[in-house]
Image (cartoon, rainbow, N blue to C red):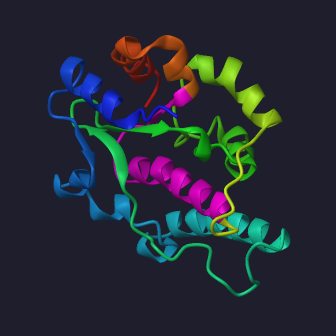
Amino acid sequence: MTRWQLPVFEEIKAHLDPLATSGRAVQGIGLDARIFDCRPESHAPPDDSMIREAYEALRQRAVADGRLGAGAPLIKRWKLVADIYSPRLRRFIEVDERQHFSRARLIRLVANRRAMWSSLYPAHFWDKVLPCLIERPRRDLDPPHRDEQRAYRDEMRERLPVLYGLRRTIRLDEFTLGAIGLEHVSGVVAQLTKEKP
């Protein structure tokens, strides 16, 4: 499996934003710390309720499927790590490999596609990739409720930046990256930034 995060980061730094930052270093550049804290109680009303609703929906899904105990928490580590942050674009850029596309995540992606905070994926993802992923979603059962954990964290990487004044997160999936080629990443990101914030 090709690991895309580092090559995408290098492409963005070279051609789009030389000040872009990646991984844990993003937390040290002075952004609001709440962007990286996905605990519902860390956020003010009414945002805390929306975040709690997403958390509970995914937790209940895992409970109903018998992969999480009724009183058990879905998440134990509440800190989020970002793939890439571009100060120039005022956006996060997340690189999604196959494991990000579980049934839980796909259901939420489709349901929230038009939300003001939802991520921006390239058209190729929506037109060509998503139908195939829906037919064969990824499963990760270590721990048994891992799909819901990852879906929650991914959704918070979309919601939280917008709540704290940043623009919508851009997501690049490994399938689109394979189809368009790494040399076109900056063009795709630039095109997505032209969409409404």
Please state if 192 lies on the left or on the right of 54 as rendered: left
- Answer with the quarter of the image where residue 66 lies: bottom right
Q: Is residue 164 part of the magenta span, yes or no?
A: yes
Q: Is residue 140 part of the magenta span, yes or no?
A: no
For the point 53% across and 29% down, the residue is: 174
> In x, y percent, where is residue 20?
21, 35
| Span of residues in magenta | 146-174
- Answer with the quarter of the image where residue 78 lies: bottom left
> In x, y percent, where is residue 3?
43, 35
> In x, y percent, where is residue 52?
60, 69
Note whether residue 169 is visible: no
For the point 28% across and 37% down, the residue is: 90
Whether 53 is drawn above or below 172: the answer is below
Please state if 123 lies on the left or on the right of 62 as rendered: left
Note whether residue 162 is visible: yes
For the point 63% across and 63% down, the residue is: 146
Nearer the observer, 149 or 87: 149
Please state if 27 lies on the left or on the right of 71 as rendered: left
Type of secondary structure dominating the magenta stretch: helix
> In x, y percent, where is residue 46?
53, 66
For the point 43% across and 69% down, the residue is: 43
